[in-house]
Image (cartoon, rainbow, N blue to C red):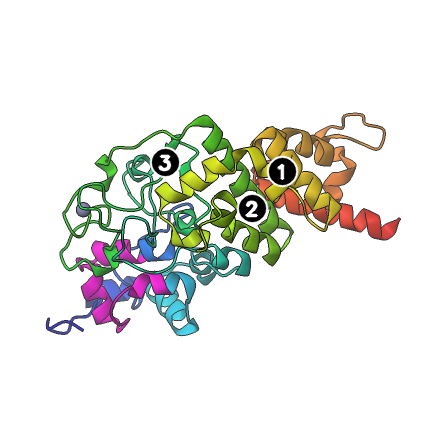
Amino acid sequence: MGQSAPISIEVQPRYRAVQGDRWPVQVSPRAGELLSSWIHRVAFAHGLPPRRFADALNFGTGMWSPRLDVDFPNWALRLFAHYSGVAPDTLVRMTVQDKFWKRLLLPLRHDVSQEKSTWLQFCPKCLAVGKTPYFRRRWRFAIHVHCRQHGCRLLDRCPRCQRGIASFDQTELKPQHCCVACGLDLRRARTQPLDAETAWVAQCIEDIGRLEFAKGSNQSLASRLLELPGMADAGKTRVLTNFSVEHRIGFYRLIASRMVDLLGSDPSPLVSFWRKRIIMEGGIDAIMQSLSDNLAFRGPRGSLYPPMRRPLMRKLPRKVVYSGEWHDLVRSYLELNARSRGSS
Ligand SMILES: [Zn+2]
Ligand SMILES: [Zn+2]
């Protein structure tokens, strides 16, 4: 706790009549937002720096909000859901619960040397999109090193002062996209393109990770991904999550010619098939159309069916076909395969 006077967010009587005891400003989570990013925006919207918001709600010191991203106790979930009006399910989806992804989290640390990872990465161009800069959940994972949308490398520290993101420690009323140490607007940080071959490696690794998540956690793949530094450079004994984004990009470049050997195999022939296909075709996007066609557009004799008469539609949640959420599609594909194997 700091030396500042105790503060709280109180709802004035005129608001209480219309919205109970909810916080006066409603802050909606953005697509793919990390919980701590949303919490910092809630604090800012109510005129409180994150550090004072934590004091007001007794969330403790240090990296209080990043801790909630990975360990969101029920009492905290109830508190935020009650006062913000955001559904508990939505809040939980902004955290990291899955065992596979938890192993690939960048460790919670702030003061770091040049070689070590920080806890959070960012794409300046993504921060600059729209009126609400926010940090994405995927930027917490070590396997992500570039932004597919903008084709640039992620940054994991302020390019001016070399400090990591520390919005949780902000004591002044400034938005979270301003570096806490030097004040730089991180949306203006210069980006660097990632060369095509390394971008291909990064894309394959991300998609293989998502495939793994779609079919259910496979701890052996997580272990393999963590050991990539040693596969790239025999002298490296520390795991992937320990290295800065620059070093991880270097490892990706070194393993480019051995992707099939290092990541293509799995005890399940079906998973092995998809992993190799992802590697050979450079990511899941390129193969999605044919997968979608196989699932939803082809009948028993390979003929095309109008949308509402497709036989497989009865076995799939409709959103799988229409939403473009490929991990749902892959999960359904794997389930269908398992089912057809079970019934044969
Ligand atoms: Zn971006
Ligand atoms: Zn800075």
Where 174 sits versus 187, above or below?
A: below
Tag 1 residue: 260
Return the disc, 3 or 2, that comes first in the chain's sequence.
3
**Which of the four quarters of the rendered structure image does ligand 1 lie in?**
top left
In-front residue for pair 313/119: 119
Secondary structure of residue under mark 2 = helix
Residue numbers of the magenta segment: 39-67
Q: Where is residue 107, by image quadrant?
A: bottom left
Q: Which mark is residue 153?
A: 3
Quarter in which the N terminus is drawn: bottom left
Mark 2 lies on residue: 210
Mark in the foreground, 3 or 2: 3
Query: Disc 3 residue type?
Result: Arg
> Distance between the Cα atoms at labels 3 and 2?
20 Å
Q: Position of residue 222 (x, y in %)?
A: 55, 54
User: Is the residue 296 above or below the residue 263 in the image?
Assistant: above
The amino acid type of the residue labelled 1 equals Val
